[in-house]
Image (spheres, rainbow, N blue to C red):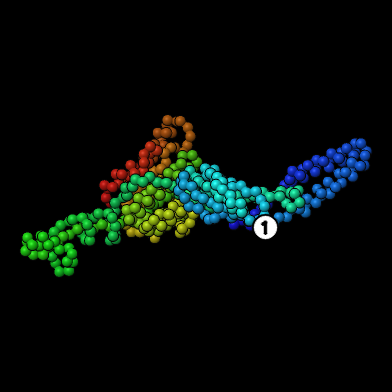
Amino acid sequence: MADGGSGLCWRWEPTELTRVLFICAGLALALALLSGRWQLAVFAAPMLGVLASSRWQRSLPPISVRAEPAQFRCFEGEDVTAVVELSGGPAALEICAPDRMTAEAAGDDGTGRWTFAVSAQRWGRYPLRAQLRTVAPGGLMAATATAEIADIIVFPLTPPASTALPRTEMPDRLGTHLTRHRGPGVEYADIRPYVPGDQLRTVNWSVSARRGSLHVTERLTDRSVDVVVLVDTSDQPPGAATAATQRAVEGAVQVVQSALRRGDRAGVIGLGGRHPRWLGPDIGQRQFYRVLESVLEVGGYQEMTGSLAPRAAVPPGAGVVAFSTLLESEFGFALTDLCARGHPVVVIDVLQDRVFDGDDVLVDLMWKLQRSAMYRNLRSVGVNVLAWPADAALDQVMGPLSGVRR
């Protein structure tokens, strides 16, 4: 809530009435000097007295404006309803929406409560501002103020198709991925003789009757994996890297969504910049929204130091999917360190264009050779590098990973 005494910073300006009085008084004094008639000066004296009192009229009753709720969460293109309440005094209210966001008045109940329909076409964090305008009791001075009344968090939409994830050794935890290990499960594996300790529900009675001794059915286990998404948050050059940052965030959200839908645990690490942060892997729909907020730097991160991914953020055996422009050498060192720990690492190159201008053929060739050499160096240490073209979906780029085992 913004308060008229503390939260609102009023800017004062003269009203139309003040301007009219000033013009009339000035004309009367000018005519009095030119014509020598003192009656005109007497006529202007009351107006000058009223204008002189304007400096003592800069006082307003406490005015407050607030929105319910104070923070909104929605997806791209989704409409949310904001109720703005104005109290404390008469004032004109106008909602100022930032770029790429619309705020349309949906109704007024006549008691100082307005309803607005707010939507945004691109993900991000948007402040919703209210602009107030009111007139002092004397009518000579008007005041305007702007206050942030709500914080709107717009989450990115991801395609419904699931993306493939790098395969790794799975921990002994119930999940949905079929393995070659034998234990509790659904898929048939083999028939073997009964040994003391086997559960009776695993006995295959038809085979036992034919062979004259107890036999049990072995099945393949279903397990889950840990997936950690690594987002490059280091400073990027303007132009192509700006679009690449958007693709990195959208790709990270899509990978997390695919992992959580399969019953896996998913986490996120923002590596780069001055304050790298991370959110530990977890399961469930609540974790999906926590990851969204973490990617948008809303909250929920745990701060860390250094340029490498901390061991607490990447559980043993977890698969790592990184999104980066591969322009920072420190990010490459972090990928190499994760491979040395035994994690399967896949990095998606989200940079589509060159980071410099010009149509020099030689420079373009040197750029391609440098990127190819970087791909080769990363692959030589165990990092799978995949380019993400502009005309391809992420599930198409990561599709070949489903058949690759670490």
Q: Residue at x 80, y 48 (%)?
A: 51
Q: Nearer the viewer, residue 61 or 391?
A: 61
**Figure disc tally:** 1
Q: Residue at x 86, y 44 (%)?
A: 44
Q: Residue at x 32, y 49 (%)?
A: 165
Q: Residue at x 85, y 47 (%)?
A: 46
Taking the image as drawn, is residue 62 in sight? yes
- Classify 10 Å Cα crowding around label 1: few (below 14), some (14-19), many (20 and above): few
Picture quarter with the N terminus: bottom right
> In x, y percent, where is residue 88?
66, 57
The quadrant where residue 338 appears: bottom left
**Amino acid type indicated by mark 1:** Pro
> In x, y percent, where is residue 230?
40, 51
- Write down the residue under mark 1: 62
Disc 1 secondary structure class:
loop
> In x, y percent, where is residue 298?
49, 54
> In x, y percent, where is residue 85?
59, 54
Query: From the viewer's perspective, is 312 left or right of 26?
Result: left
Residue 42, placed above or below residue 185: above
Q: Nearer the viewer, residue 236 or 263?
A: 263
Query: From the viewer's perspective, is 172 left or right of 136?
Result: left
Q: Nearer the viewer, residue 51 or 351?
A: 51
Query: From the viewer's perspective, is 137 left or right of 346?
Result: right
> Which residue extends farthest front?
110
The quadrant where residue 377 appears: top left
> Which residue extends farthest bottom?
196
Q: Nearer the viewer, residue 4 or 299?
A: 4
Taking the image as drawn, is residue 378 in sight? no
